Image: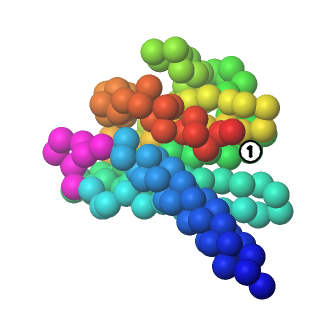
């Protein structure tokens, strides 16, 4: 009976360590979602999900300027979900343009629909054998060029660093 308090203490210590580690990881994902000059922003939010063995951690932040919107997200998910988006596709048809490129050493997939003046930029931040880390910048009401300019305001190296702890 004397060992029961020790077992309870060790169990509680492990539980608190795991809980605080995940809280700090979530904060690490939210921190790089910066303010964008001239845009109103909601506070960043985080979410962890585990569905049928597929785990995902993400942080998101929404921005508005008039009728224009931006949705930024940092995601750490299974590698298969990340790989499909960066297979080197380039095409243009009917006002829709999909471009694969590199920026500052990161693989980029930029989709823009000039008919609707909206699109999405995906940045592959890193991969392990089982996980991918991706930054997504979805937008509506701005040009492809302006979305690239906004993307450059984010510190992708800092975002990459924040995702590494979750990709083990």
Identify which residue, 123 or 75, lies in the foreground: 75
Query: Along the horizontal axis of the image, is 167 left or right of 97?
Result: right
Q: Residue at x 22, y 55 (%)?
A: 40
**Viewer can see residue 84:** no
Q: Quadrant of residue 52?
A: bottom right
Say if 107 sits above or below 127 in the image.
above
Query: Along the horizontal axis of the image, is 132 left or right of 139?
Result: right
**Residue 139 percent location from the top left of the image:** 41, 46
**Residue 24 percent location from the top left of the image:** 46, 53
Q: Residue at x 44, y 26 (%)?
A: 157
Q: Residue at x 75, y 76 (%)?
A: 3
Identify which residue, 31 or 85, lies in the foreground: 31
Q: Which quarter of the rendering shows the C terminus? A: top right
Q: Residue furthest left?
A: 38
Q: Which quarter of the rendering shows the N terminus? A: bottom right
Magenta stretch secondary structure, dominant: loop
Task: List the residue tagged with mark 1.
Answer: 78
Query: Along the horizontal axis of the image, is 167 left or right of 70?
Result: right
**Residue 85 percent location from the top left of the image:** 68, 34
Q: Residue at x 41, y 31 (%)?
A: 158
Label 1: which secondary element: strand
Q: Residue furthest bottom?
A: 1
Say if 8 sits above or below 141 in the image.
below
Please give the range of residues in magenta. Answer: 34-40
């Amino acid at each position: 009976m004397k060992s029961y308090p020790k077992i309870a203490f060790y169990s509680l210590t492990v539980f608190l360590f795991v809980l605080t580690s995940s809280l700090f990881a979530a904060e690490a994902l939210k921190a790089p979602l910066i303010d964008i000059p001239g845009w109103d922003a909601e506070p960043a939010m985080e979410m962890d999900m585990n569905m049928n063995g597929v785990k995902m951690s993400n942080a998101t932040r929404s921005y508005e300027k008039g009728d224009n919107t931006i949705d930024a997200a940092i995601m750490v998910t299974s590698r298969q979900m990340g790989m499909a988006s960066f297979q080197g596709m380039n095409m243009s048809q009917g006002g829709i343009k999909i471009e694969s490129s590199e920026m500052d050493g990161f693989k980029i997939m930029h989709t823009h629909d000039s008919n609707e003046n909206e699109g999405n930029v995906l940045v592959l931040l890193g991969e392990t054998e089982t996980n991918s880390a991706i930054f997504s910048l979805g937008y509506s009401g701005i040009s492809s060029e302006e979305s690239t300019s906004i993307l450059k305001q984010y510190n992708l190296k800092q975002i990459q660093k924040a995702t590494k702890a979750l990709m083990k």
